[in-house]
Structure formats: structure tokens, C-alpha cells
């Protein structure tokens, strides 16, 4: 690790207090001049670092530049060994995660970007990914399971993200099946889960869970066609936390659920957060929209629906609409 990254790490770990240049120089066995150069290099990258005579340096609480050091600081101890890759710009974090998964990346590897040039959602849609305002991340999982559990992991990621937003940002969340998270009737998060299987065994080699969160995107910054339904965790108010804190908490919650996800205990919470159950919906299947009543969530995360004739079926993919929410 470079001296600059070491200095950043200690500043991230001590945001609430000042750290003197002398303390850092002694800790890293370098000169105070070397520490000062590292501080100046971080400032040039955009880090808001305050210096106080006879006290030292302090990273402002408002400084919200994504970094591996910041994210790992907020991870649970058992997850800090995960590989974390942070990019300023990338085409798609899911694309990057799939590439390194094929090359043997370890379970728990995390790809994060400040912006995506080709972010993707479900059904082939693009995912609006502006810089400095959102969270765009993908996590590699290697469950010993088959392809049928892909939907189950999507629902698990939905619950994990809701828990993280509520714990860190103090905002109540609801879920629109299958993968959209809403705050006050506005979509703030989408989840895209992609599986790579072994053709010979039919087993899953790896699953990439992609999570995109509108963290502090201004309402008028969204493309006009999605402005009526797109929202952000923080809109008018200044964020009380950083994106790095929320990213780490999402990982903490997701990996906690993942340890026992096949036991399906989290589905109770998924159901309680759903705002489609008991409602009339439209769903897209076989190139047509159909009307039905959403009645339950299946044990594998599918949406159980009943049509006007009383026929019951389970949706495992596709698109649903409720009260013009799409």
C-alpha cells in the first residue's frame, strides 16, 4: 500500500478527530514532509482535508469520494478481507464482475464505480449512473446451488439493501417485486442478478449481484422520461452519511443473509416490505400484458398471482405494473 493510501486509511478511520503529521510520520516511519506530500496529493484528488495548527489533519465528514479504504473501514471484521475494486468510470460493474469471476475472483469480491457509461437494469434497460451522486456496485457470490436460486438471491439482496438504507440513512423502504426499492413511492434502487453456470453440471459457478442506488441525485437531473417515478435517498436535505458507509452496510447485510439464504428466513421480511401483495397488477409475459391479483411470494422468491378466472401461477421473471408504477 502506498503512503498516500496509508494516510487516507488513517484519516478515514479517524474522521471525528485530528491526526497530527508527526503521529503519521512515526506510524509509517517516514518524514513529516512525506506525510504533507501525501496529504496534498489527496487534496488534489478532491478529498476535503482540514488542517489545524498544533492539532493535525482531519477528513471532513462531508468528504464523499469513494475509496477502498473508506469502504473497508465500515465493513464488518469478517468481511474486510474481501477484494474491493473502486473505479472512477466503468462501462458496467456487472460486466467487470463477470469478467473477473470467470478468471477466478474470490467470493465476496466487490466492484464499485463512481459512474457507469453503460449501466444495465433488468429487461435490457439502461441504468442512469451519474457521477458523484449514486452507488453502482456488484458482488460476486459462489453459492453451491443451482440456477433456480438466482431469483431467491435477488430477493435477498432487496431485503439487505432495505435494511442497510434504514440503518444508515434512517429512511423507510418498500419493495416492488422483483427487484425495485422505493422510498415514498419513488424508485431509488434497482437490482440485477446474473448467474454463470457450468454447462456440463448445470450448477452455478458464480452469481453476480448488481445494485444501483440513487443516493443524492437531484430530481431534475434524471432523464425526463423517468423523472415521474425516479427518486433518491436524499433529495432536498444534505446526506448525513457517505456513500462508502452505505456501500459497506449493504455488503454487511447481504453477506449476513447469504450465509443462510437457502433457509429462506428473510422471505418473511421480503413479504412484509412488498407493496404489491393483495393488489391488482399487470404483468408482461409472452409478449403481452396480463391482469392478475398478486397473492403471495413463493419459497424461491417468485410472485404468485391469480387471474380473473381463478387460475394461479408463479412469476419468476418479467415485468409488473401497479398504479402506473413501472
Image: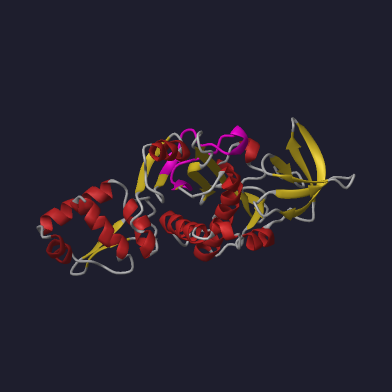
Residue placed at 38% from the left, 39% from the top? 100
Image vertical order of residue 6 relative to residue 312, above or below: below
Of 297 and 144, nearer the camera is 144
Q: Quadrant of residue 60?
A: bottom left
The coloring applied to the image is secondary structure
Residue 158 drawn at (x, y percent): 58, 53
User: Which residues are the magenta region?
Assistant: 113-140
Residue placed at 74% from the left, 37% from the top? 284
In the rendered image, residue 142 lying in the magenta stretch gets the answer no
Confirm whether residue 242 shows in the render.
Answer: no
Image vertical order of residue 173 relative to residue 99, above or below: below
Of 291 and 238, nearer the camera is 291
Q: Residue furthest top?
A: 287
Q: Quadrant of residue 39?
A: bottom left
Q: Residue furthest front?
A: 201
Residue placed at 50% from the left, 38% from the top? 196
Image vertical order of residue 248 relative to residue 85, above or below: below
Residue placed at 39% from the left, 63% from the top? 76
In the rendered image, residue 139 lying in the magenta stretch gets the answer yes
Residue 29 drawn at (x, y percent): 10, 60
Of 30 and 99, nearer the camera is 99
| Position of residue 42 in the picture relative to residue 24 (left or right) | right
Q: How many marks?
A: 0
Residue 257 drawn at (x, y percent): 52, 60
Residue 231 drawn at (x, y percent): 60, 49
Where does the C terminus fall, quadrant-wise? top right
Confirm whether residue 250 shows in the render.
Answer: yes
Amino acid at each position: 500500500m502506498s503512503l498516500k493510501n496509508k494516510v487516507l486509511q488513517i484519516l478515514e478511520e479517524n474522521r471525528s478527530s485530528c491526526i497530527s503529521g508527526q503521529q503519521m510520520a512515526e506510524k509509517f516511519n517516514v518524514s513529516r514532509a512525506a506525510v504533507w506530500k501525501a496529504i496534498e496529493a489527496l487534496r488534489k484528488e478532491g478529498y476535503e482535508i482540514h488542517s489545524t495548527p498544533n492539532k493535525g489533519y482531519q477528513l471532513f465528514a462531508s468528504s464523499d469520494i469513494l475509496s477502498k479504504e473508506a469502504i473497508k473501514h465500515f465493513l464488518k471484521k469478517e468481511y474486510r478481507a474481501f477484494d474491493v475494486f473502486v473505479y472512477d468510470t466503468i462501462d458496467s460493474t456487472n460486466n467487470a464482475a463477470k469478467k473477473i469471476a470467470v478468471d477466478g475472483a474470490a467470493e465476496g469480491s466487490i466492484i464499485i464505480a463512481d459512474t457507469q457509461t453503460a449501466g444495465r437494469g433488468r429487461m435490457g434497460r439502461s441504468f442512469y449512473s451519474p457521477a458523484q451522486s449514486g452507488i453502482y456496485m456488484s458482488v460476486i457470490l459462489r453459492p453451491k446451488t443451482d440456477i433456480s436460486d438466482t431469483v431467491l438471491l435477488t430477493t435477498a439482496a432487496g431485503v439487505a439493501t432495505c435494511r442497510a438504507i434504514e440503518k444508515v440513512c434512517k429512511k423507510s423502504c418498500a419493495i416492488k417485486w422483483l427487484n425495485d426499492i422505493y422510498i415514498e413511492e419513488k424508485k431509488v434502487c434497482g437490482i440485477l442478478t446474473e448467474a454463470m453456470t457450468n454447462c456440463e453440471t448445470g450448477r452455478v459457478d458464480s452469481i453476480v449481484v448488481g445494485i444501483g442506488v440513487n443516493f443524492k441525485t437531484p430530481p431534475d437531473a434524471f432523464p425526463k422520461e423517468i423523472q415521474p417515478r425516479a427518486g433518491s435517498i436524499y433529495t432536498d436535505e444534505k446526506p448525513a452519511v457517505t456513500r462508502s458507509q452505505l456501500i459497506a452496510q449493504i455488503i454487511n447485510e447481504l453477506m449476513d443473509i447469504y450465509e443462510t439464504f437457502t433457509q429462506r428466513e428473510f422471505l418473511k421480511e421480503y413479504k412484509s416490505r412488498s407493496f404489491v401483495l393483495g393488489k391488482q397488477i399487470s404483468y408482461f409475459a409472452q409478449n403481452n400484458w396480463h391482469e392478475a391479483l398478486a397473492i403471495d411470494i413463493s419459497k424461491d422468491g417468485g410472485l404468485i398471482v391469480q387471474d380473473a378466472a381463478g387460475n394461479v401461477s408463479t412469476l419468476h421473471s418479467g415485468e409488473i405494473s401497479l398504479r402506473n408504477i413501472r
